[in-house]
Amino acid sequence: MDHDDDQEQHAHRTGTTSGSREVITLQIGRYANFVGTHYWNFQDELWGWAQDQPGGTLLDPYDPAVMFSSAGRVVTPRLLIFDTRDAFSSLHVEAGGSASGGGGGAADHAAGWGGAVQSYHQGVPRQPNAFQSYLAASTEPAPNSPLEFHGAAVGALDASGGGELIAAQQQEIVVGAKVRRHPFGLDDDVACWGDYLKSNLRRGTLQELPFRDAGAGAFETFASGGSGGDSAVDAAARELYADALRRRLEECDAVQGVQCVADARGGWAGLAASMLADARDECRSAPVVCYPVASADDTDGGGGGSGGTRGGGAAAAAAAHGAVNRALALHALSEVCTLVAPLSEAAAAAAAARSPHVALDARRPYHTSAVLGAALEAATSPFRFSSPAAPCRMDAWVNAALAHGGHGGANMKFAGLTLAFPFAERDGNEDALGALLDAGDLRDRLCWLGMPPPPPHVHAAGSSGSAHAPAALPFTVFSELLVARGLAPAAHLQSPLLSSALDKARQGGGGGRAAAVAAFRTPLPIPLSFPLVFRPSLDERGARVPPNHSSSGEDDRVLLGEAAALAGVECSGRLAPLLRGAAEAGLDVRSAAVLRELERNGLQRDDAAEAREALRAQAGAYERR
């Protein structure tokens, strides 16, 4: 979509550096774009902070050029978005062709193809919501809105230069102004991710798929999104997508990596595998990372969808369909990616239900995707920040998560994200950290956000687990990348202390000591914008608020202008049930239903057997102790 320089809304002044550490991001699929929109809203807030702060502050390590490109006064994400035209129905085009609310209309979307344009028209265009109108009218946040982040919120370093924050500034950071719960009515207005996207988008960012319903019909199989004679995305469209990616890469001085958030079902996963194969071919020395996410509307038995409500043959066919697509996605992504970290909407909702600090409506993707977006924001921060003492590039980040890619001779590719949020313990001793992590069960604080394994009835013999508790059995942690994100943790937390506390907590929860732990500290907390699903964890004096003392009144909640987090990328035995279950259920050539689904994907028995053995080998690596 195109934003003219003279009509750009809430444009930021440039302040990028030429650090040659660019990261390209792909978002592929409906729910993936919900998650990605929250992620980019966080990036937009950080950018705004960076422009407002003088030198010598905690923002100095932040390098906006990693994620954003600039042309004149206009700054846009290094991003490609893939979705169908019905996902853009709420976006509004103003006179002159510039887009409002971070989105564009029919003609503007078609511009994402980069080639011939065919315009289409909707019968009743949807009017911009209050948030989109606000973005179009002002470059400054309204008073007491979720967009208000005071310049003083990011405090300067003290005179000693040791990185300690002034106490008064710490208190100002964690408590903001009281606000109405829904100043923009977004809980009622959000129909798609474009309704709350803040970032500016330029021509070519939106890549529109050439049909309306991506959840059924021609796009429901894995192969329909990739290459092949039966692909719903024809060769001409694929070439246009590849050209768009190539143009993004050519804009960079030296790409440090490509990351992708993609729906884990059907053609979306197939398209992701195809695009990431292109990325690998274009920049062979850079890591390629994918976060496949299972949304609640998946009908594959493991994603919380409606597949289980069907009867007889329809239920069996739906189960086989989902199982085959999941297996093919995991196998294909592991073939082209350096690291694959599956995510789940159901896991995010379950984690929120266990947390005293999160209050969300699990039926709303707008809410559940905020948790996953916060996890990605925290976990990926090491390669978005720079430090002369310990710079971290994406390849080092991947190596830390996977213990340099192998364990016992296995070429491990999978990891899972964990998140403790908010994480605001101010005491810097091991006992306090152990208490915070509830040493009896690590999962209570460091919530596992990985894709749930298939239901128990499709597990391999000897394996067990549930869709919402994949870590019920003891598991081994082979390697772990930990990110202490936020001002309070960064002021006192040291890597050995963090590792020791987490090992102690993990042993109480059934896990073994991690063979390799890499801990990163990034100074900036997560900038919370919306939805208002995160309960306050600190009072006006900076003390933690016990869960039973948190305000229950909707209008009395205190908006956290910022929040600390503890995130992890974990290579552990928790992945074994997911991988083995996918292999056994999705690629069982003895099942007639599976064979029919494989045939729809253009696969023969030998192809399925090869993919099955590859996933089994991966599962076996994670089952070693």
Image (cartoon, grey):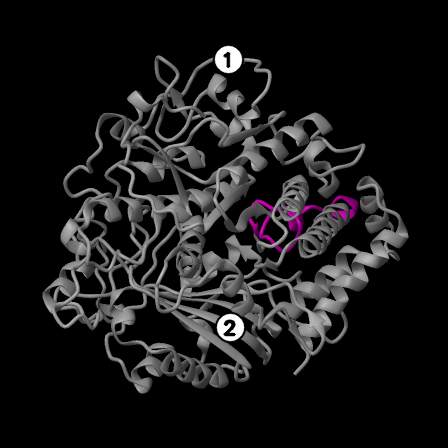
Q: Position of residue 401 (x, y in %)?
A: 53, 68
Q: Quadrant of residue 499?
A: bottom left
Q: Nearer the viewer, mark 2 or mark 1?
A: 2
Give the magenta range: 291-314
* Above or below 367: residue 57: below
Q: Position of residue 253 (x, y in %)?
A: 48, 44
In the picture, measured across the screen, residue 80 lies left or right of residue 334, that is: left
Q: Quadrant of residue 548?
A: bottom left
Q: Judge whether residue 177 can be spotted in this image.
A: no
* Above or below 237: residue 561: below
Which residue lies at the image location 59% right of the left edge and 61% below the top edge? 452
User: Residue 301 in magenta?
Assistant: yes
Which residue lies at the image location 14% right of the left edge and 40% below the top edge? 143
- Judging by the rendered image, the residue that carries numbered circle 2 is 480
Q: Nearer the viewer, residue 428 or 456?
A: 428
CA distance separating discs 2 and 1: 50 Å
Q: Judge whether residue 587 can be spotted in this image.
A: yes
Q: Position of residue 529 (x, y in %)?
A: 29, 47
Which residue lies at the image location 63% right of the left edge and 35% below the top edge? 242
Is the residue marked by circle 1 packed among few (<14), some (14-19), or many (20+) residues within 10 Å?
Answer: few
Q: Nearer the viewer, residue 462 or 339?
A: 339
Q: Position of residue 347 (x, y in %)?
A: 51, 59
Quadrant, the C terminus: bottom right
Q: Quadrant of residue 611?
A: bottom right
- Judging by the rendered image, the residue that carries numbered circle 1 is 121
Which residue lies at the image location 27% right of the left edge and 32% below the top edge? 10
Quadrant, the N terminus: top left
The three-letter code of the residue at mark 2 reads: Glu
Q: Nearer the viewer, residue 344 or 237?
A: 237
